[in-house]
Amino acid sequence: MPKQKTKASAKKRFKFTATGKVKVAQAGKRHGMIKRHSKFIRNARGTMVLCDADEKIVKKYMPYHR
């Protein structure tokens, strides 16, 4: 059997926790920060864990990271 390929875009964007959940950076902080309010910027710090539906999609993209 040939090896499966990992999506290159997925391996750059997602990391896995020790329990197998998918960690991702908060969205909406790349540019245009002047128009965002302080509460949004504060709440969008760090990383978040994806919901179960999105997690299934990402795990298909990364077959060897389960």
Image: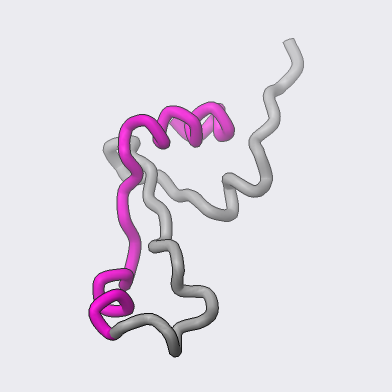
Place of residue 53 in the rendered image (x, y in percent of width and height, measured from the top left): 37, 30
Quarter of image, res 50? top left
Place of residue 38 in the rendered image (x, y in percent of width and height, measured from the top left): 28, 85
* Vertical comparison of 42 with 55: above or below: below
On-image quarter of the C terminus: top left
Place of residue 10 in the rendered image (x, y in percent of width and height, measured from the top left): 58, 45
* Vertical comparison of 33 with 28: above or below: below
For this view, does 58 lie left or right of residue 19?
A: right
* Residue in view at x 24 percent, y 79 percent: 39
* Residue in view at x 32 percent, y 32 percent: 52
Q: Could you tell me how many numbered marks the image carries?
A: 0
Q: Residue furthest right?
A: 2
Quarter of image, res 1? top right
* Vertical comparison of 5 with 23: above or below: above
The magenta region covers 38-66
For this view, does 30 lie left or right of residue 44?
A: right
* Residue in view at x 31 percent, y 55 percent: 48
Is residue 9 a member of the stretch shown in magenta?
no
Place of residue 19 in the rendered image (x, y in percent of width and height, measured from the top left): 27, 37
Q: How is the image coloured?
A: one colour
**Could you say which is closer to the camera, residue 19 or residue 50?**
50
* Residue in view at x 31 percent, y 48 percent: 49
For this view, does 14 lie left or right of residue 23?
A: right
Q: Residue furthest front?
A: 35
* Vertical comparison of 38 with 57: above or below: below
